[in-house]
Amino acid sequence: MRTTGILLCYVASVFLLAALLAPGLFLLGQSAAAEFAQFQPLASQPFHRYVNRCLLVIAVLGLWPLLRALGLADRRALGLTSPLAARRELGLGLALGFGSLLLAVLALTGAGVRGFNFTLPQAGMLQLLGTATLSAVAVALLEEILFRGVIFSTLRSVWPLWAALLASAVVYSVLHFLARVEHTGPVGWDAGFALLPRMMRGIAAPENLLPMLTLTVAGVALGLAYLRTGNLWFAIGLHAGWVFWLKVFKTLTTAGTPAGAFWGTEKLLDGWLACLVMAGVLAVITRLPQSPPLIRPDEIPPRD
């Protein structure tokens, strides 16, 4: 109960602090822009982006105290072995992640639902690929440390294995579907608290149920990869390969014939095709050889 309570307190604290801090930071940005022109781009950002950025920054800053409280400050407990030693797992995960969504892209373009965009200038293409690569690395590292290294590892120490695997996958999926809502009217101290419930409605939106299922399957695959390989690097590579395609797909392709529920849209993950691809990845991961069991937080010997 203590372990689960710490996780719940962490999540609640992230949302609470973001709601409290975002209005003050927004008003500070407005005041700074009135005095200094260089702050004008910051002041022009809508309030909901302040809330979103606060959620992200606070979640990252809160990771270290969370790790300490859960006894996961040792990188071995997080599955972060030497990346050089785990380069094979990292490479295989990256190939599977990149290749699996490449198959989905080729299926979509082959069916005429999407077409490749050959009009992009070279400079624009290089910028897109560079930005997508950086995003893939950053997102994969952060999310795998949080959802598999922290949440799954922690739940695994107190829950049955498959319950912990499924629960961590559901949390991973659900948090990707907070609604993108805008705030209208003046920004008061309680504006963040008014915005958060509206963001939560995205979790229950009917159009998000299928992509939420797809990400849940993906989360189970990532957690199982962590279990089978004994470290996070295969999962990080897998995740990075997926994120890369999610970042470039809409720009690299154009709309073709009208798509149905099977094919999805330019979001790539909102059709049954993507769900089947993730199920296929999960099937592949079940065939991975079993490495030495993961180190549980309570199994780490104390340092001298």
Image (cartoon, rainbow, N blue to C red):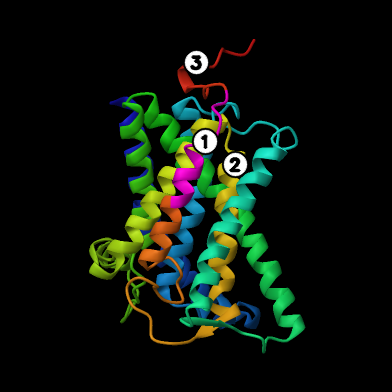
Figure check: 30 above or below 194: below
In the figure, residue 128 lies in which quadrant?
bottom right
The single residue placed furthest to the top in the displayed view is 304
Q: What residue is shown with label 3?
A: 299
Q: Residues within 10 Å of mark 1 (few under 14, many from 20)?
A: many
* Residue 152 visible somewhere in the drawing: yes
Amino acid type indicated by mark 1 = Tyr
User: Position of 141 compared to 283: left or right?
Assistant: right
Q: What distance separates the C-alpha of mark 3 from that of mark 2?
A: 23 Å
* Residue 9 visible somewhere in the drawing: no
At horizontal 45% and vertical 51% (from top left) the residue drawn is 280
Question: Residue 226 shows which numbered tag?
Answer: 1
Residue range corresponding to the magenta coloring:
280-291
Secondary structure under the numbered disc 2 in the rendered image: helix
Amino acid type indicated by mark 3 = Glu
Tell whether position 145 is magenta. no
Check contact, mark 1 vs mark 2: CB within 8 A. Answer: yes
Question: Residue 234 shows which numbered tag?
Answer: 2
